[in-house]
Image (cartoon, helix red, strand yellow):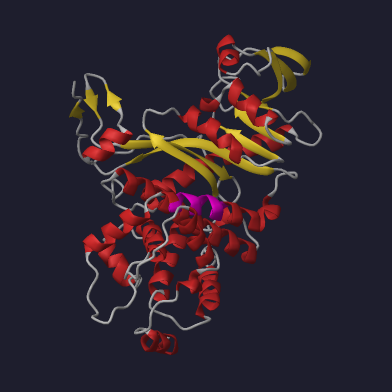
Amino acid sequence: MLSDAIPLVIDLPNAPDWRRLGEHLPVEWVEAALLANDKASIRSRRLPAQQVVWLVIALALYRHKSVKEIVDSLDLALPEVAERCITSSATTQARQRVGADPLKWLFQQSAQQWIAHDQAQYLFKGLHLLTMDGTTLRLADSAANRAHFGAQNYPNDKVASYPQTRGVTLMMAETQLIRDARFGRYDIAEMTHAHRLLESVPDDSLTVFDRGFWSAQLLCNLVSRGKNRHFLIPAKSNTKWTLVEGTDEDAVVEMAVSAQARKNDPSLPLKWRVRAVKTPDDGSGKTRYLLTSLMDRKAFKTDDLISCYQRRWRIETSYRELKQTMMGAALTLRSMTVDGTEQEIWGAMIAYNLIRIEIAKAALEAKCAPTSISFTLALMTIQTELIMIGPATAQGRLPATLKRLRERLVLDLKAQRPGRKFDRVVKAVAQRYPEKRLVKKA
C-alpha cells in the first residue's frame, strides 16, 4: 500500500537500527559472541564486527546474490560522510577479522534459547524428541579447502571434483530446529562426531538414530551419562540377542557387548538389555525391529515408538532445505579459505534456525503443526521482509512486520497428502552433465 511505502521512503537516509531485528537474535547476543572470542571492533569502521555477523547470516539467506548486493540491499554498511561505496575486498577483510568462532558461539547459544521458548508445547509423553544423523556439504574448490577438508575418493585413483566436509547434527524432531552440530574433515567418521554430540543431548529425552549409528558404546553412554535419556534405533539384519521376556512382537532382549567396544571404553558392561519392538511388514518379507531403552510397555506402546521413528525422516528434510532450498542453484559454499568456510557453515546454521523458529512461532499462533508450513514459502517471505526492513528504520515497525510475516506463512498451509504408496528412500540426484573426477595425486 502507498501508506506503507511512504514511511520507507522517508526513512531511507537514516542509519539502520539492527536492534529492531532482535526479537529472535538480540544485538546483545551478537556482542556477547564477539566479546567471548575477543573479536569486538575497537576502531570505527563502516563494517564493524556486529554488522559482519549479520552479513554472514545473510550470505546463507541470499545465496543467489553477491556479497556486495547483500551489503547494499540490507544497508549493512554504516553511513560515511564521503558516501563512498564499500568494496568487495573490504567485506572480505571484515569477515577475516571476525573469523568463525563468534558465529559458532552464537549458533550454540541461540539454538539453546530458541528451543527453550516452546519446548513444552512439543513434548512426546514428557520427553524431548530428537533425532541425530550425518551429512556432507560441498565446498568451494580451492587448494586450502581441499588440503584441510579433503574429498571423497573413488576407485581407479579418482577423487571428487569438490572438497567436502562431513558433519552430524542433533535436531528437535517436532520443530526441526538444530540443537547442535559438529563438522570437520571428510575423512572423520560420523560416529566420531556423534560421540561428541552426546553432551548436547538434554535430560528427559528420546533420541532417534538411523541404523548406521548402531554402537553399544554410543547408546550406552547416551543413557548412562544423563538423566532419563533414551534412544530408539532400528536393529541391523545381523544383530543377535537372547530373549529375556515378552513376545516376538514386543520383548526385552539381552545382547553381548563386543570385546572391541569394551577395549575402547572399559566402563561398558559385558551385556546390556534393550527392548525390541517388531515393525509392521513393509512388503519386503523381511522382519524388522526397533530397539529402545524405553522399557515401560504401558507408557510407550509399540505404535508410539514406530511413529517416533517415522519422524526421524524430518532430519533428512532439513538437510534438503539446507543444501538445496537455501543454496538454490549454487553447487557449493562461497568461501575459498578454511576459516571463511567454517564461518559460512555456522552462519548457515543460524540462518536455518532463524527460519525454523519463525515457522514454529507462526504454527503456534495458527494452532497447527510446524510441518504444515512450507519452508520454501517461509524462506522467500523472510528474504522479502528483510529487504524491506533493512532501510526502514522507523522505531516500532518490527513487531507489526513479524506479525504480518506469520500471517503470510499460514495463508497457504500444506494440503493433506494421501498415504504413500512406497517407502521414503534416498534417491540419487539426476546429473545434467557427466561428473568430472580428478586423478588422485601420488
At 27% from the left and 24% from the top, the residue drawn is: 154
Residue extending farthest front = 42
Residue 65 visible here: no
At 28% from the left and 61% from the top, the residue drawn is: 91
Q: Where is 66 relative to 177, above or below? A: below
Residue 337 visible here: yes
The image shows residue 100 at horizontal and vertical percentages of 39, 49
| In the foreground, 195 or 253 | 195
| In the foreground, 254 or 257 | 257
Instruction: Locate residue 256 relative to residue 388 in the image: left or right.
Output: right
Residue extending farthest right = 298
Instruction: Locate residue 180 relative to residue 426 in the image: left or right.
Output: right
| In the foreground, 148 or 7 | 148
Q: Where is 327 relative to 54, above or below? A: above
Chief SS of the magenta region:
helix
Residue 299 figure quarter: top right
At 44% from the left and 66% from the top, the residue drawn is: 381
Residue 387 figure quarter: bottom left
Query: Which corner quadrant holds the C terminus?
Result: top left
Q: How many marks?
A: 0
The span shown in magenta is 102-111
Q: Where is 395 relative to 289, above or below? A: below
The image shows residue 113 at horizontal and vertical percentages of 60, 56
